[in-house]
Amino acid sequence: MTTPSASRRDRKKAATRQAIADAALQLFLEHGYDQVSIRDIADAADVSTATVFKHFSGKEALVFDQDEDREAELVAVVRQRPSGQSVPDALRQHVLDTWPAIAGHPQAAEFTDLVNSTPVLRAYSERMWTRYTDSLSAAIADEFGVEHDNLACAALARFVLDIPALARGRQDRRAAVETVFDILTHGWEPPSRPAAP
Protein backbone atom coordinates (compact mmCIF):
# COMPACT_ATOMS: atom_id res chain seq x y z
CA MET A 1 0.00 0.00 0.00
CA THR A 2 2.89 2.41 0.68
CA THR A 3 4.52 2.00 -2.75
CA PRO A 4 1.93 4.00 -4.76
CA SER A 5 2.04 6.82 -2.19
CA ALA A 6 5.87 6.92 -2.26
CA SER A 7 5.77 6.89 -6.05
CA ARG A 8 3.24 9.73 -6.07
CA ARG A 9 5.44 11.68 -3.65
CA ASP A 10 8.48 11.16 -5.89
CA ARG A 11 6.52 12.32 -8.93
CA LYS A 12 5.35 15.40 -7.05
CA LYS A 13 8.90 16.22 -5.94
CA ALA A 14 10.18 15.79 -9.50
CA ALA A 15 7.38 17.99 -10.85
CA THR A 16 8.12 20.70 -8.28
CA ARG A 17 11.84 20.57 -9.08
CA GLN A 18 11.12 20.84 -12.81
CA ALA A 19 8.68 23.73 -12.30
CA ILE A 20 11.32 25.63 -10.32
CA ALA A 21 14.01 24.99 -12.94
CA ASP A 22 11.67 25.99 -15.78
CA ALA A 23 10.63 29.20 -14.01
CA ALA A 24 14.27 30.07 -13.28
CA LEU A 25 15.41 29.52 -16.85
CA GLN A 26 12.55 31.60 -18.23
CA LEU A 27 13.36 34.47 -15.88
CA PHE A 28 17.08 34.25 -16.62
CA LEU A 29 16.45 34.33 -20.36
CA GLU A 30 14.03 37.25 -20.08
CA HIS A 31 15.88 39.43 -17.55
CA GLY A 32 19.44 38.16 -17.33
CA TYR A 33 20.97 35.92 -14.68
CA ASP A 34 22.23 38.70 -12.39
CA GLN A 35 18.90 40.56 -12.38
CA VAL A 36 16.89 37.58 -11.05
CA SER A 37 16.80 36.65 -7.35
CA ILE A 38 15.92 33.38 -5.67
CA ARG A 39 12.79 35.16 -4.34
CA ASP A 40 11.80 36.01 -7.96
CA ILE A 41 12.19 32.38 -8.93
CA ALA A 42 10.24 31.13 -5.91
CA ASP A 43 7.40 33.54 -6.68
CA ALA A 44 7.30 32.54 -10.36
CA ALA A 45 7.20 28.84 -9.42
CA ASP A 46 4.69 29.50 -6.59
CA VAL A 47 6.91 27.95 -3.91
CA SER A 48 8.85 29.24 -0.92
CA THR A 49 12.55 30.10 -1.11
CA ALA A 50 13.13 27.22 1.32
CA THR A 51 11.58 24.87 -1.24
CA VAL A 52 13.92 26.21 -3.93
CA PHE A 53 16.93 25.47 -1.70
CA LYS A 54 15.50 22.05 -0.83
CA HIS A 55 15.82 21.12 -4.50
CA PHE A 56 18.86 23.16 -5.60
CA SER A 57 22.16 23.97 -3.91
CA GLY A 58 22.29 27.49 -5.31
CA LYS A 59 21.36 29.83 -8.11
CA GLU A 60 23.84 28.37 -10.61
CA ALA A 61 22.44 24.86 -10.07
CA LEU A 62 19.05 26.12 -11.26
CA VAL A 63 20.51 26.67 -14.72
CA PHE A 64 22.07 23.22 -14.86
CA ASP A 65 19.17 21.37 -13.27
CA GLN A 66 19.96 18.01 -14.93
CA ASP A 67 23.65 18.11 -14.05
CA GLU A 68 23.71 15.18 -11.60
CA ASP A 69 21.49 13.03 -13.84
CA ARG A 70 23.77 13.58 -16.84
CA GLU A 71 26.87 12.69 -14.83
CA ALA A 72 25.22 9.49 -13.52
CA GLU A 73 24.07 8.57 -17.05
CA LEU A 74 27.60 8.87 -18.45
CA VAL A 75 28.99 6.57 -15.76
CA ALA A 76 26.11 4.10 -16.24
CA VAL A 77 26.71 4.01 -20.02
CA VAL A 78 30.20 2.66 -19.36
CA ARG A 79 29.41 0.36 -16.45
CA GLN A 80 26.12 -1.07 -17.72
CA ARG A 81 26.89 -1.45 -21.43
CA PRO A 82 25.93 -4.76 -23.05
CA SER A 83 28.47 -7.55 -22.95
CA GLY A 84 30.80 -7.33 -25.92
CA GLN A 85 30.12 -3.64 -26.62
CA SER A 86 33.23 -1.46 -26.48
CA VAL A 87 33.36 1.61 -24.28
CA PRO A 88 33.66 4.01 -27.27
CA ASP A 89 30.71 2.32 -29.01
CA ALA A 90 28.56 2.60 -25.87
CA LEU A 91 29.45 6.27 -25.51
CA ARG A 92 28.83 6.87 -29.24
CA GLN A 93 25.33 5.42 -28.92
CA HIS A 94 24.63 7.50 -25.82
CA VAL A 95 25.74 10.73 -27.48
CA LEU A 96 23.70 9.95 -30.61
CA ASP A 97 20.62 9.07 -28.51
CA THR A 98 20.74 12.15 -26.29
CA TRP A 99 22.69 15.06 -27.72
CA PRO A 100 20.82 15.85 -30.97
CA ALA A 101 17.57 16.29 -28.99
CA ILE A 102 19.29 18.70 -26.59
CA ALA A 103 21.01 20.60 -29.41
CA GLY A 104 17.73 20.81 -31.32
CA HIS A 105 15.80 22.26 -28.37
CA PRO A 106 14.18 25.60 -29.30
CA GLN A 107 15.96 27.35 -26.40
CA ALA A 108 19.39 25.77 -26.98
CA ALA A 109 20.94 28.87 -28.57
CA GLU A 110 19.49 31.20 -25.91
CA PHE A 111 20.71 28.87 -23.16
CA THR A 112 24.22 28.77 -24.64
CA ASP A 113 24.26 32.57 -24.95
CA LEU A 114 23.12 32.91 -21.34
CA VAL A 115 25.92 30.66 -20.07
CA ASN A 116 28.62 32.18 -22.29
CA SER A 117 27.65 35.77 -21.40
CA THR A 118 27.49 35.20 -17.62
CA PRO A 119 30.93 34.71 -16.01
CA VAL A 120 29.60 32.88 -12.94
CA LEU A 121 27.66 30.43 -15.15
CA ARG A 122 30.61 29.95 -17.47
CA ALA A 123 32.82 29.10 -14.47
CA TYR A 124 30.18 26.75 -13.05
CA SER A 125 29.85 25.03 -16.42
CA GLU A 126 33.62 24.54 -16.64
CA ARG A 127 33.72 23.00 -13.15
CA MET A 128 30.79 20.77 -14.10
CA TRP A 129 32.55 19.54 -17.27
CA THR A 130 35.76 18.92 -15.32
CA ARG A 131 33.78 16.83 -12.86
CA TYR A 132 32.14 14.92 -15.72
CA THR A 133 35.58 14.25 -17.19
CA ASP A 134 36.86 12.96 -13.85
CA SER A 135 33.81 10.72 -13.27
CA LEU A 136 33.74 9.34 -16.81
CA SER A 137 37.50 8.80 -16.84
CA ALA A 138 37.30 6.94 -13.51
CA ALA A 139 34.49 4.72 -14.81
CA ILE A 140 36.50 3.89 -17.95
CA ALA A 141 39.62 3.21 -15.87
CA ASP A 142 37.65 0.87 -13.58
CA GLU A 143 36.51 -1.12 -16.61
CA PHE A 144 40.12 -1.81 -17.54
CA GLY A 145 41.51 -2.17 -14.03
CA VAL A 146 43.88 0.79 -14.25
CA GLU A 147 44.48 3.84 -12.05
CA HIS A 148 41.92 6.65 -12.20
CA ASP A 149 44.56 9.10 -13.44
CA ASN A 150 45.32 6.97 -16.52
CA LEU A 151 45.97 9.40 -19.38
CA ALA A 152 44.33 7.26 -22.09
CA CYS A 153 41.10 7.03 -20.06
CA ALA A 154 41.16 10.76 -19.27
CA ALA A 155 41.76 11.64 -22.93
CA LEU A 156 38.88 9.46 -24.13
CA ALA A 157 36.54 10.98 -21.52
CA ARG A 158 37.59 14.53 -22.41
CA PHE A 159 37.20 14.04 -26.15
CA VAL A 160 33.81 12.37 -25.79
CA LEU A 161 32.57 15.27 -23.67
CA ASP A 162 33.85 17.76 -26.25
CA ILE A 163 32.03 16.09 -29.16
CA PRO A 164 28.79 18.10 -28.78
CA ALA A 165 30.78 21.36 -28.92
CA LEU A 166 32.76 20.15 -31.95
CA ALA A 167 29.58 19.11 -33.77
CA ARG A 168 27.57 22.21 -32.86
CA GLY A 169 26.82 24.37 -35.86
CA ARG A 170 27.50 21.59 -38.38
CA GLN A 171 24.82 21.08 -40.98
CA ASP A 172 24.59 17.35 -40.19
CA ARG A 173 25.28 17.10 -36.46
CA ARG A 174 24.73 13.35 -36.39
CA ALA A 175 27.33 12.80 -39.13
CA ALA A 176 29.72 15.09 -37.23
CA VAL A 177 29.31 13.01 -34.07
CA GLU A 178 29.94 9.83 -36.07
CA THR A 179 33.06 11.35 -37.66
CA VAL A 180 34.60 12.29 -34.32
CA PHE A 181 33.86 8.86 -32.85
CA ASP A 182 35.40 7.23 -35.93
CA ILE A 183 38.57 9.24 -35.29
CA LEU A 184 38.56 8.18 -31.63
CA THR A 185 38.00 4.55 -32.55
CA HIS A 186 40.19 4.16 -35.64
CA GLY A 187 42.70 7.00 -35.35
CA TRP A 188 43.16 10.24 -37.23
CA GLU A 189 43.91 10.25 -40.93
CA PRO A 190 44.68 13.30 -43.07
CA PRO A 191 41.60 14.55 -44.89
CA SER A 192 41.63 14.01 -48.63
CA ARG A 193 41.35 16.93 -51.01
CA PRO A 194 38.24 17.14 -53.14
CA ALA A 195 38.82 15.84 -56.66
CA ALA A 196 39.51 18.54 -59.24
CA PRO A 197 36.61 19.13 -61.69
Image (cartoon, helix red, strand yellow):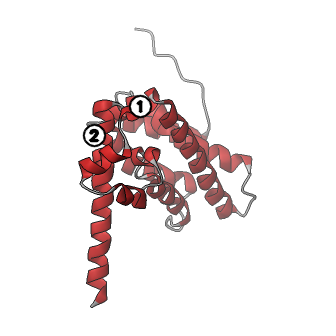
N-term-proximal mark, 1 vs 2: 2
Cα separation, mark 1 vs mark 2, equals: 23 Å
SS of the residue at dot 2?
A: helix
Q: Nearer the viewer, residue 70 or 91?
A: 70
Residue 6's place in the image compared with 100, above or below, is: below
In this figure, what is the number of numbered marks? 2
* Residue 144: image location, x then y, percent: 69, 61
Any mark on residue 56, and which? none
Q: Residue at x 50, y 38 (%)?
A: 163
The residue at which mark 2 appears reads as: 26
Q: Amino acid at mark 2?
A: Gln
**Badge 1 density bin: few <14, some 14–19, many ≥20, Cα 10 Å:** some
In the image shown, does 168 or 42 lie closer to the viewer? 42
The secondary element bearing badge 1 is classed as: loop
**Which residue is labeled 1 in the image?**
168
**Within 10 angstroms of label 2, few (less than 14), some, or many (20 or more) residues?**
some
The quarter of the picture where residue 104 lies is: top left
- At which x and y percent is residue 131? 59, 49
Residue lying farthest to the top in this orientation: 197
